Image: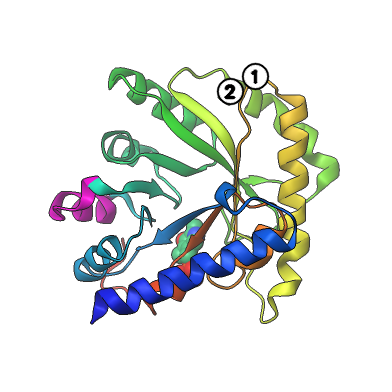
Amino acid sequence: MLVEQIRQRYLETLERMEKAAQRTGRDPRQVQLIVVTKAQPLEVVQAAIQAGAQALGENYPEEGVMKIQSLPEAKRVQWHMIGHLQRRKAELVIQHFDFFHALDSLRLAQRLSRLAQEAGRILPTLLEFNVSGEASKFGWPAWEEAAWPNLWPEIEAVLTLPGLAIQGVMAMPPLFENPEEVRPYFRRLRRLFETLSQRFPQAEWRHLSMGTSADYEIAIEEGATMVRVGQAILGPRPPKQEPK
Ligand SMILES: *Cc1c(COP(=O)(O)O)cnc(C)c1O
């Protein structure tokens, strides 16, 4: 049965997460599992909730909202928007999501903050960085550490916005055949996280969102506090029906 299968893989993932945390002397309770349900049909998302998932990650706002509105169980879990967000869809995130992982520009931040204030809420948000230099990746450019100071003015401006609670950083590094090869990218994000915490004490730097099915154990060894795992728990994603 679908729920049982997902439950088994969910529990196995939690167990591996726990071991990865223990290997590096970390408290496993510091690491949250976001089950990535993007592109999965409703019955799989429902089964994930029934299997015990507490936080779900979606990439496309409309798809996420459709699921949130269709599932009677939706209120039992936290909904995380983990994908690139276009400014004209900012309202959907403010109205429906609990947490945003992929802030990548000051203009988007300004809009989200204004809409959040109008809605009487504060959106917990992470800054996304491109730590690899791949053109296909979103996020502020952060692959050259010597150029990090160029980012400070914009980040400082983001931190003044009253509708956003900036709580950390996120990245989507390259995929490798051998997951060990991703470690230097996780380390770079971790160094950036530490640099930001020292440079901007006005924010509460709590979260490093990094690691997917392919490499979440390594991400935890390198300090992740949130891992975003889809296929390892839910199985392969069905092919996309239509763009977004
Ligand atoms: C799809 C996706 C994931 C999860 O990838 P899996 O291979 O299914 O674990 C994590 N983070 C982001 C931003 C994604 O788009």
Classed neighbour count for the residue bearing mark 2: other residues with Cα under 10 Å, few (<14), some (14–19), many (≥20): some
| Rendered view: 43 above or below 103 | below
Ranked by sequence position, the earlier of labels 2 and 1 is 2
From the viewer's side, name the closer residue of 111 and 76: 76
Residue 92 versus residue 13: which sits nearer the camera? 13
Residue topped by disc 2: 159
Residue at 44% of width from left, 41% of height from top?
Answer: 100
Q: Depth check: 223 or 29 in front? A: 29
Left or right of 21? Residue 213 is left
Tell me if residue 12 can be seen. Answer: yes
Query: What's the amino acid at mark 2?
Result: Leu
Up/down of 157 relative to 195, above or below: above
Assign a secondary structure to mark 2.
helix
What SS does tag 1 mark?
loop
Please identify the quarter of the rendering in which residue 58 is found.
bottom left
Q: Which residues are magenta?
A: 62-75
**Magenta highlight: main SS:** helix
Q: Give x and y (percent) for residue 172.
A: 59, 58
Instruction: Name the residue at 27% across, 69% down.
Output: 242
Please give the name of the residue rendered at 58% of the width and 73% of the height, measured from the top-left corner: 214
Query: Pointer 1: what residue?
Result: 202
Q: Are marks 2 and 1 in contact (CB under 8 Å)?
A: yes
Residue, x 50% and y 65% (percent of image)?
14
Please say which color scheme the image uses: rainbow
- Residue extending farthest right: 146
Q: Amino acid at mark 1?
A: Gln
Gap between marks 2 and 1 measured at Cα: 8 Å
Neighbours of disc 1 within 10 Å: few (<14), some (14-19), many (20+): few
Residue 238, x across and y down, in percent: 32, 78
Instruction: State yes or no: residue 136 in magenta.
Output: no
